[in-house]
Amino acid sequence: MKPLLYVPLDEAASNAIDMAQISSKSEKMNHPIDLSQIDGGRMPVFVATVGDEALLKRAAAYKERAFLLFPEPEEGKSLPKELLKSRLIFIPVRLESLASLSYSQTIKSLEQLCYDSAPDDFNLGSEHYFQEMPTGLFHRFYHAEGRHLKEAVLRMAHTVRSIRIKEGAAYTLHLPANTALFALDEAIDVLEIAVPPDKPIFFAVRFDKRLQSAVRVSALVATPDIPASDLQRRIDGQRSYLGKLAVIVEAFAFRQIDENEMVDLCRDNGLDPDDADRFYDLIYARSDETADLIRKLRTTPLAGDREELIAQKLAEGFIDVRILEELAGLFALDADAILKRAEEIGKKSRV
């Protein structure tokens, strides 16, 4: 992994980085920052001690992969869309009594993850995981210490089980060089049991030849806890293409989102923004005509007459093929027959 470059986004963040006593391999930028001064030879670590959107968006303006340490969002609060679209690796910090102390502990865990290694250490797939941490997830650091390996591992296993990990975990064990291999094997078994069997788990085991450090177990847990907005949850709750489109267009019609946000939501959910424009025109700009069509379809008993009504509107350009498919499904009609009839009507009107 590249050497780390700590980028404080506020004054308190600068103090927290100083408190962490970062490695000599790392560097720290002065506050206030200038993004143009960040070169590609280092991995930026943006640090914000307040969840101010303007501050977080400054980090999102950086176009390459980087870490972002920021306060754990309140439950149910969604992140700015600029962050969700960025290449940032999210590391939320749970604030304890002293924010600077909470940040310094997280920074120390990150430093140990990146730098604390020696030729005698070994890993089980973990190094690749650390270098390719996925975006779009929350990466949380936890650690436990104790005089004995079993004591520290049991404490960490309890922590991981209590947070109901959903995606996976990466552990880094720091052990005295005289640790028996059977004890290490037992410790790894305990940690594997703490993680659901279908989730990834990675290990890096590092030994202290001088036997001076306490046993330390660190976990990097990745969870998809980024809360979706209420609007996105409503979109996800719709099974049909038209249903998803209806939710987005309704939000636009009631000015909950602007036109650019409507386009972004369509693209994020695999919908055509042009369909949103047509749907808005159909439902809101010409709502009386649409209501009249639906009313006639509901009060017309014969399937053939219903198909004729829809074919007429399709030929007029009042609805398109996707609306046709939804209406055909709703009223159990033959979509191909409607299309054929609409073509016949169109040809007659052009003669």
Image (spheres, grey):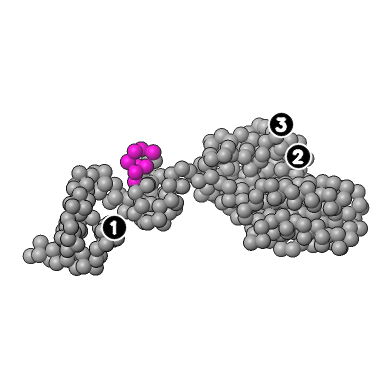
Q: Position of residue 87 (x, y in %)?
A: 56, 51
Q: CA distance from mark 1 to mark 2?
A: 62 Å
Give the extent of the magenta segment.
249-256
* Side of 333 relative to 151 (left or right): left
Relative image position of residue 244 (x, y in whole percent): 38, 52
Question: Which circle's residue, 1 or 2, is located before the other in the chain?
Answer: 2
Q: Is residue 152 magenta?
A: no
Residue 218 horizontal/vertical position (percent): 76, 50
| Residue bearing the label numbered 1 | 330
Front residue of this view, candidates 63 and 260: 260
Residue at x-position 76% and y-position 39% = 20
Report the disc number at residue 140: none
Q: Inspect the image, locate mark 3, and give the three-letter code of the amino acid beneath it.
A: Ser
Residue type at mark 2 is Ala
Residue name at image x 32 percent, y 50 percent: 276
- Per the model, the C-alpha gap separating discs 1 and 3 is 57 Å
Q: Which residue is mark 3?
A: 97
- Which disc is residue 20 wearing? 2
Q: Quadrant of the C terminus?
A: bottom left
Front-most of 329 and 279?
329
Looking at the picture, which amino acid does disc 1 mark?
Answer: Leu
Q: Secondary structure at mark 3?
A: loop
Quadrant where the N terminus is found in the figure = bottom right
